[in-house]
Image (cartoon, helix red, strand yellow):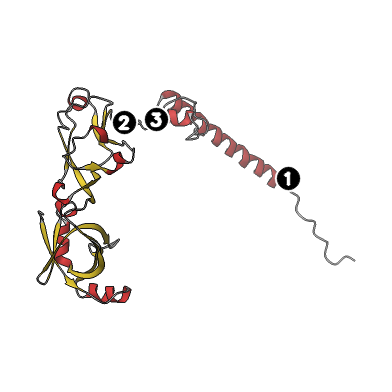
């Protein structure tokens, strides 16, 4: 059985959240190794070395060699729990691999021919990926590193489904086996960006209220808009002057309170 990465580990017997926190403070990552008709076994891994391995795409889709002391076990990575804010790993799950039993694992898809696709090169379309990896089932010896997807023959508004992919012998697509022939990739026209509404259109749609005295439909800066604005300003000045005159008249017509003559009873 071919393995691609060696993963150094140590056995751990302590369980629970407190034990896991203590391991993380020491620069370790708690892990669990299960499957293969054997009891689960707790492991601890070096955090920095694990981070380096996780940067490689193949680490997720190949068979690993888990080494504890002088013991070696073939396994695949099943789950990685990461910290939501920091670049750190909280926990990983590993599944033992038995050479005579099928494994289920997700592997990446590599797309080729995108720039020369008919729908892109000749018809102005763009490529849209609905999937970037895929769930497969196979014996360990038949496990591919990736599935290659050729999109060079796609025209505009065409797509490739799971049933269109070229799958290596001995490999089964899990979704397709369950009757789901999902879309993998397609070519379509890019969406046109909507132009920003002009001032006139905004007023017409009621988004922006027209200024007082402005002529509806007149663009800002147009002669009609300027004239209307000036006329509105003049009307406001006239109203203010009339208000001042009325106030003055009220003051002139006001009677002073009568004063009683002093000394008379």
Mark 3 residue crowding within 10 angstroms, few (<14) / some (14–19) / many (20+): few
* Residue shown at 23% from the left, 42% from the top: 172
N-terminal of the pair, mark 2 or mark 3, is 2
- For the residue pair 227 and 82, the one nearer the viewer reads as 82
Residue 51 at x, y = what percent?
A: 17, 61
Give the residue at mark 3: 198
Measure how far apart labels 2 and 3 are at the Cα level.
21 Å
Looking at the image, residue 164 lies above or below residue 1: above
Q: Secondary structure at mark 3?
A: loop
Q: Residue at x 31, y 35 (%)?
A: 181
Q: Tell me, yes or no, if residue 132 can be seen here.
A: no
Residue position for label 2: 191
Upstream in sequence: badge 3 or badge 1: 3
Q: Residue at x 22, y 23 (%)?
A: 123
Relative depth, front residue between 259 and 9: 9
Q: CA distance from mark 3 to mark 1?
A: 54 Å
Q: Earlier in the sequence, mark 1 or mark 2?
A: 2
Q: Which residue is mark 1?
A: 253
Q: Are marks 3 and 1 in contact (CB under 8 Å)?
A: no
Quadrant the N terminus occupies: bottom left
Mark nearer the viewer, 3 or 1:
3
Mark 2 lies on a secondary structure that is loop
């Amino acid at each position: 059985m071919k393995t691609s990465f060696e993963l150094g580990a140590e056995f751990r017997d302590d369980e629970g959240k407190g034990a896991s926190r203590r391991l993380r403070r020491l620069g370790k990552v708690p892990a669990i190794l299960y499957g293969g008709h054997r009891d689960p076994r707790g492991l601890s891994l070096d955090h920095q070395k694990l981070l380096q391995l996780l940067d490689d795409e193949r680490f997720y889709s190949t068979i690993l060699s888990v080494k504890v002391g002088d013991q070696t076990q073939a396994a695949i990575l099943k789950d990685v729990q990461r910290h939501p804010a920091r670049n750190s790993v909280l926990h990983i799950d590993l599944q033992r691999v038995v050479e005579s039993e099928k494994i289920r694992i997700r592997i990446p898809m590599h797309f080729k021919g995108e720039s020369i696709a008919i729908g892109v090169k000749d018809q102005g379309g763009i490529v849209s990926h609905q999937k970037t990896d895929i769930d497969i089932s196979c014996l360990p010896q038949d496990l591919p590193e990736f599935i290659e997807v050729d999109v060079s023959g796609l025209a505009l508004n065409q797509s490739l489904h799971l049933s269109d992919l070229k799958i290596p012998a001995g490999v089964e697509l899990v979704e397709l086996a369950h009757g789901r022939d999902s879309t993998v990739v397609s070519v379509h026209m890019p969406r046109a960006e909507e132009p920003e509404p002009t001032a006139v259109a905004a007023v017409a749609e009621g988004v922006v209220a027209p200024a007082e005295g402005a002529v509806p439909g007149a663009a800002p800066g147009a002669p009609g808009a300027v004239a209307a604005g000036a006329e509105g300003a003049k009307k406001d000045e006239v109203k203010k002057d009339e208000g001042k005159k009325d106030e003055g008249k009220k003051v002139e017509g006001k009677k002073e309170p009568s004063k009683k003559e002093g000394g008379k009873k």
